[in-house]
Image (spheres, rainbow, N blue to C red):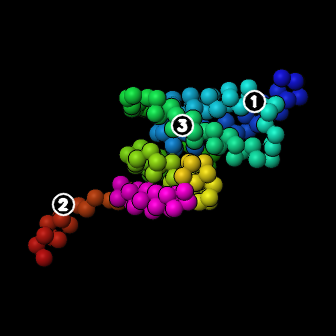
């Protein structure tokens, strides 16, 4: 690779690494898995850097690689392991909400089926429209819409506060 191309690749990778890592984490729910997927994507991109013709659409191309690599890795894994951590993950430069709220959200995302989680992350975290999401996931727009609705409903159920025992007994007495 020419020195100019290598410098261009390094600048791109350095600028996008953090965002891609966060997106990969939201897709798979495991920081180690996310790191592996992002490394795989950047390795493939580096090898094919001179073949990438449309640099103005590079983000979309890399995002597609990321989603596909995440699903490919998930299919290859015959088991899933969960790792606990004493420190909450750093997912944003300017986090909103409390650490506890973010951890609850990550836990809820991890409990969702992979396809629903991918649709919710791509639509609402990456802010992609239905068409782009469908293209990335290799499905129809109708599937994206239905998975969005089901995924949001699942998140609402997972994030809904559980009623206090006193509320349960009052509701049963009426």
> Residue 170 at what x, y percent from top left?
15, 70
Query: In which quadrant of the rendered image does the C terminus lie?
Result: bottom left
Q: Main secondary structure of the magenta part?
A: helix
> Residue 96 at what x, y percent from top left?
55, 53
Q: Secondary structure at mark 2?
A: helix
Q: Secondary structure at mark 1?
A: loop
Say if mark 3 contacts mark 1, CB within 8 Å: no
Considering only vertical position in the picture, is 73 above or below 54? Answer: above
Query: In which quadrant of the rendered image does the N terminus lie?
Result: top right
Q: Earlier in the sequence, mark 2 or mark 3?
A: 3
Evaluate whether residue 114 shows in this view.
yes
Q: Is residue 120 left or right of residue 165?
A: right
Q: Is residue 49 left or right of residue 99?
A: right
Residue behind mark 1: 48
Residue sitting at the far bottom = 174
- Inspect the magenta stretch and tell me whether residue 151 lies in it: yes
Mark closer to the observer (2, 3): 3
Q: Which mark is residue 5?
A: none
Label 2 packing within 10 angstroms: few (<14), some (14-19), many (20+): few
Q: Which mark is residue 165?
A: 2
Q: Nearer the viewer, residue 73 or 87?
A: 73
Q: Nearer the viewer, residue 18 or 167?
A: 18
The stretch in magenta equals: 140-158
Label 3 packing within 10 angstroms: few (<14), some (14-19), many (20+): many
Q: Is residue 1 left or right of residue 116?
A: right
Mark closer to the observer (3, 1): 1
């Amino acid at each position: 690779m020419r020195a100019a191309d290598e410098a261009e690749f390094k600048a791109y990778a350095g600028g996008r690494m953090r965002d891609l890592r966060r997106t990969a984490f939201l897709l798979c729910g495991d920081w180690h898995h996310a790191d592996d997927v992002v490394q795989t994507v950047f390795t493939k991109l580096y090898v094919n850097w001179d073949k990438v013709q449309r640099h103005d659409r590079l983000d979309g191309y890399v995002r597609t690689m990321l989603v596909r690599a995440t699903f490919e890795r998930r299919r290859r894994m015959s088991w899933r392991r969960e790792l606990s951590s004493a420190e909450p993950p750093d997912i944003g430069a300017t986090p909103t909400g409390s650490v506890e709220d973010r951890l609850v959200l990550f836990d809820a995302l991890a409990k969702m089926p992979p396809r629903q989680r991918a649709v919710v992350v791509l639509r609402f975290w990456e802010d992609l429209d239905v068409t782009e999401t469908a293209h990335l996931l290799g499905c129809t727009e109708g599937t994206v819409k239905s998975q969005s609705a089901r995924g949001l409903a699942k998140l609402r159920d997972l994030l809904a506060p559980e009623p206090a025992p006193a509320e349960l007994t009052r509701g049963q007495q009426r």
